[in-house]
Amino acid sequence: GGGGSGWLLPAFLPERLCRAAVMGLLLPGLLLLLGSACRGAAAQEDLLPLELSSGKFKTVLLNRTIPMEAVLRNIASNVTVVLFQIHAHQKNVTISFDKKPAVNNSGTGVDRGLVSLLRPQQNVCTWYLRAADADQVLSTAVSLSYMEKDPIPGGCNLEFALEIDPNIYLEYNLAETHIKFAPANIGYPRGADPPSCDSGTGQDTRWRLYYDIYQYFLPENDLSEVAFVSHMRKMSEVQDIGANGIRMMTLSSEDKTDLYFSSLPGQGVIYNVVVRDPLWNTSAAYVPVHTYACNLNAVVDNCSSLRRLSTKVFFTALAVLSLFVCFFGHRFWKTDLFFMGFIFMAFFFFIMITKVANLHYDVNLGLTALTGVVGGLLLVAYWWRFGIVFPCMLVVGIVLGFLVAATTFFTPLGDYKVFQNDSVFWVTFCCIALMVPVAFVGCPRVLNILACGTVGSYIIVLAAACYLYTSLSYIGIDLLRRILNDDFRRAYSSVPFQPNDFILLAVWAMLAIGGITVQLRRERSEAPFPPHPYRLWKRERERRITNILDPSHHVPPLRERILSRLSQVKDLFHKEQLAGERTPLLL
């Protein structure tokens, strides 16, 4: 009876209640069907592959949860190797042969690639892409095809996880950038066994290959993703690399495949390697890699905030003094000596305190400025007391000589491998630096005017580098790196020369030439150097003592004048008398 009443209950309910009950029974089923249909549509959308064409770049938005399938179809029968690569601006991506990446079939980074060796009759290749860290990453991908006589990048890999690794691995710090890559192998037909990598060193092995190292600079002070994508495409294929990149060096198969370059924080640089087979006159490119030598994602001390406020204050204040010295240094001799003594003492103190103490950069710079002031005052005091020109001009000549030597090694001359030896470098550097004061030992006034114009104008360029990017600042920075970093000797120093650099180079040249010309014309009829200050002061003091008619003879000594001033200050705090005699009594 109880079971039957459940079936008979709707007959006693109103019609509206019956409809609601029916909808309540049907609604969960409808929702299940709708959810299944949505999931099926989403799954079909996710399974849509990224269709590739050989040599054509495709922009793709990757996510972290669902891998994107990239497919290259209709591969020609004469193609034996396909190199697939993907590049992201700042977020890591993962590329793999399977949907589930493993250590030996995938790679993760901002610039990564995989080599697919084709089997006979194979005309389709598939790879899987996903974002590694962020939820979504915009990236650009390309596949490149190579024939059986083309060398295979990374084909003789013995160091990294992949069996064939075409990637260039990059590490950097503030001083140097380190790149390394796996050796290549010679090409071979589909289905054949790969040539042995280490069975011999003859002309029929991979030891005949050569590696050209290329460098490409992105536009100065441009950290945008649009600039990165457009310029990365110029460094992926062999022909484009040769047309746009700068060939830094060529390595043989006997050379080590790890190299060091000077870091340029805030400046985008792309590196790539082209492996050449001289026997078959063929070549292939590795996967290009890029760096800004700084962290684009950091909240503090990122690529956009490299220039510290303390550096701006220091060099801006110094630039004001430098501009004065550039045009009036020799006329105001003591100011000139203070400026040169400041630079001389500050330079060596900064090196010493950086090597000895592990202090914050702002503390180092503050102590350096204080020591520079002391150094400038000491040089002025030495001139005032002794009045000997030669030691003062030796300091001035060394400052100018250091700038000349640093500029010499800033040119391509500094990249010669012989100068990676510290002994050769420092002997050559010191000879150039000391050659300057020795060459002008007979005309110290000309040496001082040259130093005022050249050094003063370069300090102005350094101050400009605090506000806009310029490679000219690395004239001094690379010298400090060589002194402070023992490993910097192995780094190749290469910097871009772009519009900012040409403008500031012209400003430096005009200021230097203008300052030197103005001072030479003004001082040609004057005495070479001012007279001895201490002798003048001593003679003047004796004259005041012996000549009682001189008004200065009646000036009280310095001690009495100071005490008199202090007593006047003390009288300001005395209470004013309310009554009584205020005028002195006449006796």
Image (tube, grey):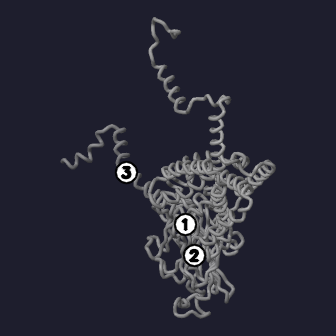
Q: Measure the C-alpha gap from mark 1 to mark 3.
A: 64 Å
Residue named by callout 2: 421
Secondary structure found at label 1 = strand
Confirm or deny contact between disc 1 and disc 3 (CB under 8 A). Answer: no
Q: Is residue 7 visible?
A: yes
Residue at label 3? 28
Residue drawn at the location 63% of the way across and 57% of the way down? 391
Label 3 environment density (alpha carbons within 10 Å; few <14, some 14–19, many ≥20): few
Q: Of marks 3 and 2, which one's residue comes earlier in the chain?
A: 3
Residue 531 higher or lower than 245, as above or below:
above
Q: Residues within 10 Å of mark 2 (few under 14, many from 20)?
A: few
Q: Is residue 168 above or below residue 121?
A: above
Residue at image mark 1:
176
Q: Quadrant of residue 247?
A: bottom right
Mark 1 vs 3, N-terminal side: 3
Residue 299: percent from left, percent from top: 49, 51
Q: Position of residue 214 (x, y in %)?
A: 64, 72
The residue drawn where x is 24% and y is 46% is: 6
Say what secondary structure mark 2 lies in.
loop
Mark 3 or mark 2: which is in front? Answer: 2
Residues marked 3 and 2 touching at CB (< 8 Å): no
Q: What residue is at 59 percent from the left and 57 percent from the top?
A: 266
Q: Relative to 229, is 68 on the left or the right?
A: left
Q: Amino acid at mark 3?
A: Pro
Within the image, what quadrant is residue 402 found in? bottom right
